[in-house]
Structure formats: C-alpha cells, structure tokens
Amino acid sequence: MKTDTLFRPFSLKGMELRNRIVMAPMTRSMAPEGIPGQPQVDYYERRAAADVGLILTEGTVIDRPASRNTPGIPFFHGDKAMAGWTDVAAAVHAAGGKIAPQIWHTGSTRAGKWEPEAEVESPSGLVGPDEPRGRAMTEADVADTIAAFASSAKLARDAGFDAVEVHGAHGYLIDQFFWSGTNKRDDRWNGPTIKERSRFAAEIVKAIRAAVGPNFPLILRVSQWKQQDYTARLATTPDEMMDWLLPLVEAGVDMLHCSQRRFWEPEFPELDGADGLNFAGWAKKLTGAATISVGSVGLNSDFGGAFAGEGSQTTPLDRLITRMERDEFDLIAVGRALLSDAQWAKKVRSGHMDELHGFKAENLQTLS
C-alpha cells in the first residue's frame, strides 16, 4: 500500500506541517490539580518524535467555575498550568512536531460520580432533551465564557503553541448551544434555525480572533452526533450544514475538525451514494475552509466500544488513502490507534503495517 499521500507537507497561516497526520485530542484526566507535568511532556513528545505532524492535546478547560467534569482534566489558565503547557510545547517542537491545545468547557455533561464544586452551567440547564442538570447561563455567564475562551487562546499563542483548537462538538457546552434539544433559551443565543443557534460559537470565534490576531491558526471541532445521542444531527441537508458552518468560518475559523464515528461513511448518501463525501469533505466543499477528518482510523470499531472496555483490531488504510488522494479533506486525525501505539505514524510511513497493533482499553489508564 502506498501511503505517500499521508506524508505530504501542509501549510496553514504559517504553520508548516511535515505531513497530514494529526494526533486527535483524547481526554486522559491525569493532571493532578489540573496541572500538566513531566508525564504529559513525555506523552506528547513521544508522538511528535515518531512522525506525527500535528499534536492536538487532550481537552483543556477555560477559566470558568465548572468547566470540567472530572478532576484530572488539565487547566489552560493560571501560572502553574501554563508553565506545564509551555514545557509540553517546547518538547514537541524539539522533536520536530507542531502542537495546538484543545480548549474546552464541558457544559452540563456527566463523567462518573465526581461533581465540580460550582453548579454546572449550560444554555438551558439541560444535559439532554428533557433532562435537567445544573442551571441556565445568564447573560453575564455567556459574556464571561466568551472572554475566557479568548483568554485561553491568547495564552496558547503566548506559550509558543502553533495554533489553537476550540472544542465545539460531542454534546459539550458549545454544542449544547447548537443543539435544539439542549438550547431552549428565549434570547438571541437561540432560534428556530441552526444558523441562529450558532451565534454563541461565532462570538467565541470573533473574540479569539481579536485576541490572537489575524495570523494565528484557529481550528474548531464540530460533530453531528452527541455523547447524549449518537444519532443526533444538526444538519440534515447541505444547505443546513452551510448555515451552521459558514458563519463560523466567516467569523474567523481557519480549519474545521469534523468528527464522525467512522470517517469512511458518507455524510449525505442519499445525494452522492455510498462512496460520497464524508463530513469533512462536505464541510470543505461548502465553506472553502481546510478540514480535518477523524473517526476510527485504522481500527475496526468506533470509539463507543472503546469506552465500554472493548479493544479494536487494526484494519487496512485503503479507504483513507483513497479519500486523501482525491483531497476530500486536508488532514486526518488518529485517536485510539496512536494512544496505544506511539510509533503508529512512523510504522505507516516505513511500510511496517504488520507491526501495527490495535487499541486496548487498558491503555486508557496510562500515559504511555
């Protein structure tokens, strides 16, 4: 199998990537008191040293009282946390890679029994349709949250990161504004259309762009599915998808990170068949923005089974190569395969496919 297409360089606003392989952000929850340390430095450095082009860190939270849903999630604010993240960025650069933090607010989602000290917040005090949790955000909460995202993005630029990614997917806070099932507000942050429900995200993007300037790459992760409902869809037609995503690109997003459970599945099969464009392909076609695709790369099952304790075997990369060769999307993010095998990209580049090994659920318990 020829994998040359995965190892073409890529450039975005001065961020020069040596190849098209991205380490997907994966929650690890192993930062004591929210502070990253040497284990995180080593964890990311290993992937950069083994030919990953761009590292997207695990989700790191902005400065809001209940922005995280497990105690080990790292902060992306405060002097101690930022000193740790500066060390991470320096190590990745020394290994030849590029890195962007994923900044995040978990909204009203649950993760086990732990509860933050402050009451959780969300657009309407819901964690899912007709499922109350926490409280609805006030106008002041909304304004402070927008400012907190901008502050963390500026900290990323000042700490030497190459870009910043905002987590707007998977049923967390920003996505709870997108989703009509969790956004029941009666103010300007809601409306009957996805375009109206995108205003909160657009204001975050505008605030970040103002804070970091015009030349710092800004990535936004989006998804149709939610952890609360794998079948949820924000956009059921290309027109709806354009109404959702184009205003965000116009607000300042440079790259859309389009998360789907299986990257090879067409987004609108009823329009262009079983081999049609995937989510990232449609997002690129409709908005003109660069895109990252992600979803079970090199594995035989999606992430849902992984978090239920199941493993995944490796599968051929033929479908990925085909889509990359036709430039359907620009970059491909690899999650669980890289979590279990830090050498994944190097093995693929050298043709040692027989040495790849599948994801094992126990790998979630360590920073190996």
Image: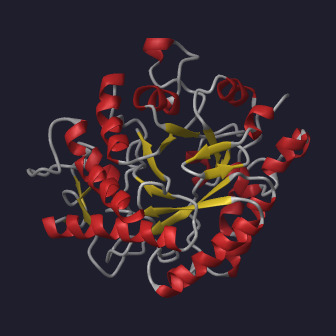
Point 19% across, 65% down: residue = 137
Q: Is residue 204 above or below residue 72?
A: above
Residue 106 place in picture, x, y as percent: 38, 63
User: Quadrant location of residue 25?
Assistant: bottom right
Residue 126 place in picture, x, y as percent: 24, 57
User: Is 126 displayed left or right of 267 in the figure?
Assistant: left
The residue sitting at the left extreme is 186
User: Is 131 displayed left or right of 362 in the figure?
Assistant: left
Q: Is residue 11 above or below residue 151?
A: above
Tell me, yes or no, if residue 327 can be seen here. Answer: yes
User: Quadrant location of residue 149?
Assistant: bottom left
Q: Quadrant of the N terminus?
A: top right
User: Is 350 displayed left or right of 49 in the figure?
Assistant: right
Residue 73 place in picture, x, y as percent: 50, 72
Tell me, yes or no, if residue 260 can be seen here. Answer: no
Front residue of 239 and 133: 239
User: Quadrant location of residue 38?
Assistant: bottom right
Q: Quadrant of the C terminus?
A: bottom right
Point 76% across, 69% down: residue = 94
